């Protein structure tokens, strides 16, 4: 686990893409005055950029390392060890969650100091907790991509999936999507996480629908990862 954390933390693309970029975006466009539906606009922007950092961190940390390990033949070595499927999956989930923290912390600090986002301590804790739990489906999705794609193809696939979910989920961009795309948006985990975060900073709990979408994606992605892991004896 320590090796994986160090490897990811030394990845320059990770540091820029998932920490510097969301913090920079927030400092450029998130420090707006005024309110929307009784909530600070700067706080809503904080949620969007924190979701950017959390979902991207989970996808890249969980999936990128697996793709590299497959390319180097390390996965085959793991399969002959006493490591169980559950232990391997748990370790990857923990890694993905840990790698979410730096980006979320950076955006939160920017919101507190530069955006003057004022939230009670309980809401800060609830928001960070939601982001950590809500990053699970993205980490599992990253794992699945890492198990079916190799090397640079995997990195490209992770980036494409990340931006597709970010745009569909309202992490990037604003306003309703045309036609059926708006209905599709509401089924994405990124949308559920953004809307759940907005509810938390407004002092409410996420809705059953928002929690349900995240739960369904988590279960589906977890099952896909386990099935692929068991099938990839020749990875």
Image: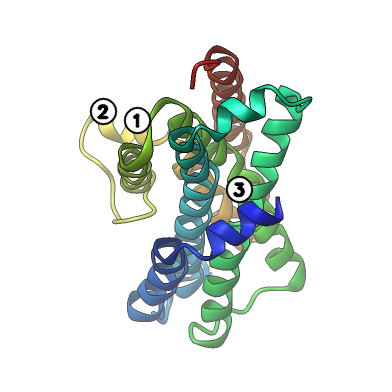
Residue drawn where x is 47% and y is 48% of the image = 60
Which numbered marker is on residue 162?
none
Horizontal side of 92 relative to 36 (left or right) equals right
Horizontal side of 4 relative to 65 (left or right) equals right
15 or 79: which is nearer to us?
Answer: 79
In this view, 110 is above or below 2: below
Residue drawn where x is 61% and y is 48% of the image = 96
Label 1 sits on a secondary structure element that is helix
Q: Is residue 187 visible?
A: no
- The earlier-in-sequence mark between 3 and 1 is 3
Q: Number of numbered discs present?
A: 3
In this view, 149 is above or below 11: above
For discs 3 and 1, the disc positioned in front in the rendered view:
3
In this view, 115 is above or below 51: below
Give the labeled residue for mark 1. 183
Assess whether mark 2 and mark 1 are in contact (beta carbons under 8 angstroms): yes
Assess whether mark 3 and mark 2 are in contact (beta carbons under 8 angstroms): no
Give the labeled residue for mark 2. 180
Tell me if mark 2 has few (under 14), some (14-19) or many (20+) residues whose alpha carbon lies within 10 angstroms of its own. Answer: few
Q: CA distance from mark 2 to mark 3?
A: 32 Å
For discs 2 and 3, the disc positioned in front in the rendered view:
3
Residue drawn where x is 65% and y is 59% of the image = 127
Give the labeled residue for mark 3. 96
């Amino acid at each position: 686990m320590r090796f994986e954390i160090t490897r990811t933390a030394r990845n320059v693309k990770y540091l820029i893409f998932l920490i510097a970029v969301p913090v920079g975006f927030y400092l450029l466009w998130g420090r707006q005055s005024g309110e929307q539906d009784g909530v600070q606009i700067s706080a809503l922007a904080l949620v969007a950029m924190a979701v950017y950092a959390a979902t991207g961190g989970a996808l890249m940390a969980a999936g990128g390392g697996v793709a590299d390990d497959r390319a180097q033949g390390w996965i085959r070595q793991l399969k002959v060890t006493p490591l169980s499927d559950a232990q391997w999956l748990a370790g990857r989930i923990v890694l993905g969650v840990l790698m979410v923290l730096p980006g979320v912390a950076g955006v939160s600090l920017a919101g507190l100091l530069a955006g003057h986002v004022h939230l009670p301590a309980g809401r800060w804790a609830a928001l960070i907790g939601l982001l950590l739990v809500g990053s699970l489906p993205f980490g599992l999705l990253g794992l699945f991509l890492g198990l079916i794609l190799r090397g640079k193809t995997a990195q490209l696939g992770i980036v494409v999936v990340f931006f597709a979910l970010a745009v569909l989920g309202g992490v990037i961009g604003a306003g309703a999507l045309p036609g059926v795309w708006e209905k599709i948006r509401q089924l994405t985990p990124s949308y559920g996480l953004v809307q759940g975060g907005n509810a938390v900073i407004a002092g409410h709990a996420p809705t059953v629908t928002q929690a349900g979408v995240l739960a369904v994606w988590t279960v589906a992605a977890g099952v896909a990862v386990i099935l692929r892991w068991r099938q990839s004896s020749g990875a």
